[in-house]
């Protein structure tokens, strides 16, 4: 069943009449463990029968049973098709995301992202290939994704192994949105130092793309993408000036806005609401501040407000700071993990609020935190946010890797007990009421 909702463009121009209520009390949740024994779960896609596909970064798609627990055999073993990974240590590469086509019930199409070995055409010192691919999931039991059904949709050469983005979301317009990081290294500089990628509209790095995957070709360009028909940039681009959007989701209610969590560098993490053609500032800005690559630890305030073509730079809806030498109560952590606007029934106090996380407060320790943000009722553009207390389990130390949402709008959070690809410490939890 293919649901067609009003287009994003129409919704973006709608008056902001849908305002969620502010939180009434300190936010709390309980976490119900639904899967464990993974290495690094990074994506979950609910199936219509109540099961779900869970991506383990090291190259597996596992089947989560309805009610919890993983099926023994993976639905897909792709370990020998990935770029070489840093097993046992920190790595942003691997199998990264899976999502179902909106018409999955009849067409069984699924889309995935992963890092593949470097292409022969890429510069010799570059790292890998970010690949967006399509697979089919036959209906026969046991459910198995046929690796030979793969159809490559888009490949992007990566200069470095980090900052892949690679989050996927189908919009209410039926198009596929894909986040791509700035290429890696620091300051959006490095193996292509003459110009940063995120501000370069002729680079596919540092962007969110919007693809029409509903035709016969691997993809078509939606006719109203911002750079269609002109010479301003790549036609795949929907929004740009992004560093590493690790989190990309549409609000399934409200105004169906597109939320991106853009991982910051040394100082500020941010959440953006993306609109078509928007420039979100990196690497001219980080959070609400100007950014100088020659002094990346010193914010430039107010900093530049315009891009190279004179376009206004969009502010995020919120930022939080990294822990620094000062004990800063707003210093929530070092790397944002994007989530979802809550539209389920189990946690009514969060309805219309954006639930996300910080990966950890300290790279060496499992100190992730869940966070909730809400649009202020006074019309201010900047959202408010607060840490969510996890009341169960009491000892909940983990790196928060990703979120998922089921067809009822209930949320899942994925965690890793280590900061890298160490087997066994990856878990999937469902968010439950605290009492
Ligand atoms: Ca930004």
Image (cartoon, helix red, strand yellow):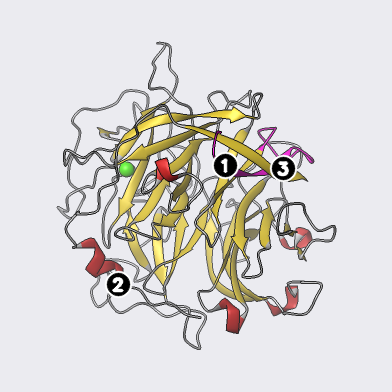
Q: Residue 418: within the magenta? A: yes
Measured in 3D between alpha carbons, the distance from the residue under mark 3 to the one under mark 1, in whole angstroms, is: 34 Å
Q: Taking 137 as reference, is 74 above or below it?
A: above
- Magenta-drawn segment: 416-435
* Lower sequence index among marks 3 and 1: 3
Q: Bin the neighbour count of mark 1 within 10 Å (Cα to Cα): few under 14, some 14-19, many 20 and up.
A: some
Give residue 189's position: percent from left, percent from top. Answer: 42, 42
Residue that mark 1 sits on: 432
Residue 145 picture quarter = bottom right
Residue 262 visible within the image: no
Q: What secondary structure is found at the residue carrying circle 1?
A: strand
Residue that mark 2 sits on: 7
Give the main secondary structure, helix, strand or loop, of the magenta stretch: loop
Give residue 11's position: percent from left, percent from top. Answer: 25, 65
| Viewer-side label of 3, 1 | 1
Q: What secondary structure is found at the residue carrying circle 2?
A: loop
Residue that mark 3 sits on: 86
Measured in 3D between alpha carbons, the distance from the residue under mark 2 to the one under mark 1, in whole angstroms, is: 32 Å
Q: Taking 258 as reference, is 296 above or below it?
A: above
Of residues 353 and 120, the one drawn nearer to the viewer in this rendering: 353
Q: Bin the neighbour count of mark 2 within 10 Å (Cα to Cα): few under 14, some 14-19, many 20 and up.
A: few
Give residue 335's position: percent from left, percent from top. Answer: 49, 35
- Name which residue lies at 67% across and 37% down: 416
- Name which residue lies at 43% across and 17% down: 324
Image mark count: 3
């Amino acid at each position: 069943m293919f649901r067609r909702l009003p287009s994003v463009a129409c919704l973006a121009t709608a008056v902001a009449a849908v305002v969620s209520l502010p939180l009434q009390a300190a936010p709390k949740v309980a976490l119900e463990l639904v899967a464990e024994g993974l290495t690094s779960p990074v994506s979950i896609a609910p199936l219509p029968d109540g099961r779900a596909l869970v991506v383990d970064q090291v190259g597996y798609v596992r089947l989560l049973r309805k009610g919890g627990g993983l099926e023994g055999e993976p639905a897909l073993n792709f370990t020998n098709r990935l770029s070489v990974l840093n097993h046992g240590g920190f790595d942003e590469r691997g199998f990264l995301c899976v999502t179902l086509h909106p018409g999955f019930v009849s067409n069984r199409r699924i889309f995935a992202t992963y890092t593949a070995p470097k292409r022969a055409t890429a510069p010799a010192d570059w790292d890998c290939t970010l690949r967006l691919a399509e697979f089919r999931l036959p209906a026969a039991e046991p459910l198995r994704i046929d690796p030979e059904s793969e159809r490559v949709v888009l490949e992007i050469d990566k200069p470095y192994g980090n900052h892949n983005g690679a989050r996927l979301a189908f919009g209410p317009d039926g198009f596929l949105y894909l986040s791509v990081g700035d290429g890696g290294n620091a300051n959006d500089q490095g193996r292509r130092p003459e110009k940063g990628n995120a501000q370069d509209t002729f680079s596919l790095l540092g962007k969110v793309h919007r693809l029409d995957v509903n035709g016969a070709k691997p993809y078509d360009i939606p006719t109203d993408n911002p750079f269609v028909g002109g010479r301003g940039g790549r036609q795949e681009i929907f929004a740009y000036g992004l560093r590493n959007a690790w989190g990309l989701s549409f609000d399934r209610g409200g105004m169906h806005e597109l939320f991106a969590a853009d991982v910051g560098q040394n100082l500020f993490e941010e959440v953006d609401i993306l609109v078509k053609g928007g420039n979100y500032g990196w690497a001219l800005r980080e959070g609400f501040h100007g950014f100088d690559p020659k002094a990346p630890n010193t914010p430039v305030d107010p900093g530049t407000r315009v891009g190279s073509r004179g376009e206004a730079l969009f502010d995020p809806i919120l930022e939080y700071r990294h822990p620094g030498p000062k004990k800063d109560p707003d210093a929530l952590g070092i790397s944002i993990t994007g989530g979802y606007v809550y539209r389920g029934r189990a946690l009514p106090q969060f309805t219309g609020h954006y639930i996300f996380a910080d990966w950890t407060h300290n790279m060496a320790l499992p100190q992730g935190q869940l966070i909730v943000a809400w649009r202020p009722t006074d019309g201010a553009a900047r959202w408010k946010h607060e840490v969510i207390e996890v009341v169960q389990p009491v000892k909940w130390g983990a790196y928060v890797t990703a979120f998922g949402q089921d067809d009822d709008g209930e949320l899942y959070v994925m965690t890793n007990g280590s900061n890298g690809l160490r087997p066994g410490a990856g878990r999937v939890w469902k968010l439950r009421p605290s009492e």
